[in-house]
Image (spheres, rainbow, N blue to C red):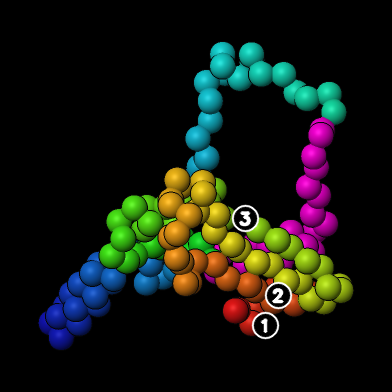
């Protein structure tokens, strides 16, 4: 028993220093909801002007790319503080999804720096990515 105590303490210290991410756990943050009295003033639209529709397999491929491009807890980093803050926003990115066939999807994330008020001469070399996802939800390539 005495020999196990230091081992258990060592394992516990390692796990605590690594945090729960060691086990693949992350905290789920629920989306913000408006108060019911404010929601009561909003009416459902009678007709949609623009509709984006994703079939189930396309949506599944999109989720795979999202999880890889925006992993839970990941933060942008760099020397340009304003640009780092900007790249941390999901609403900055435009997404293009192309269903090549039932077994291949191309999903591209492209930053739109105008949404952050960045000057037009701002050069960003590595802000987006293009994913090739197969019909089984596997990442074939990231460019």
Point out the image quarter for the C terminus: bottom right
> Residues under labels 3 and 2: Cα distance?
18 Å
Label 3 with label 2: CB-CB less than 8 Å: no
Q: Quadrant of residue 132?
A: bottom right
> Residues under labels 1 and 3: Cα distance?
21 Å
What kind of element bears circle 1?
A: strand
Residue 49 pos. (x, y %): 81, 34
**Residue behind mark 3:** 94
Crowd class of label 2 (few under 14; some 14 to 19; many from 20; radius 10 Å)? many
Residue 139 pos. (x, y %): 65, 78
Stretch in magenta: 48-68
Residue 141 pos. (x, y %): 64, 82
Label 2 with label 1: CB-CB less than 8 Å: yes
Asked if the stretch drawn in magenta spans residue 25, the answer is: no
State the residue at coordinates (30%, 56%): 81
**Residue behind mark 1:** 140
- The label number, if any, that marks residue 133 in the structure image: 2
Of the image marks 3 and 2, the number of the one nearer the N terminus: 3
> Which mark's residue is nearer the viewer, 3 or 2?
3
């Amino acid at each position: 028993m005495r020999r196990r105590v230091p081992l258990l303490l060592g394992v516990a210290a390692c796990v605590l220093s690594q945090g729960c991410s060691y086990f693949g756990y992350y905290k789920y943050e629920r989306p913000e909801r408006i108060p019911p009295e404010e929601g009561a003033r909003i009416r459902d639209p009678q007709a949609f002007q623009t509709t984006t529709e994703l079939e189930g397999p396309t949506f599944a491929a999109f989720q795979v790319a999202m999880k890889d491009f925006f992993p839970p807890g990941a933060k942008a980093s760099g020397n340009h503080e304003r640009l780092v803050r900007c790249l941390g926003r999901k609403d900055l990115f435009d997404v293009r999804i192309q269903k090549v066939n039932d077994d291949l999807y191309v999903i591209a994330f492209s930053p739109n720096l105008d949404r952050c008020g960045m000057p037009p001469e701002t050069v960003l070399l590595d802000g987006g990515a293009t994913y090739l996802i197969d019909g089984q939800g596997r990442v074939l390539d990231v460019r």
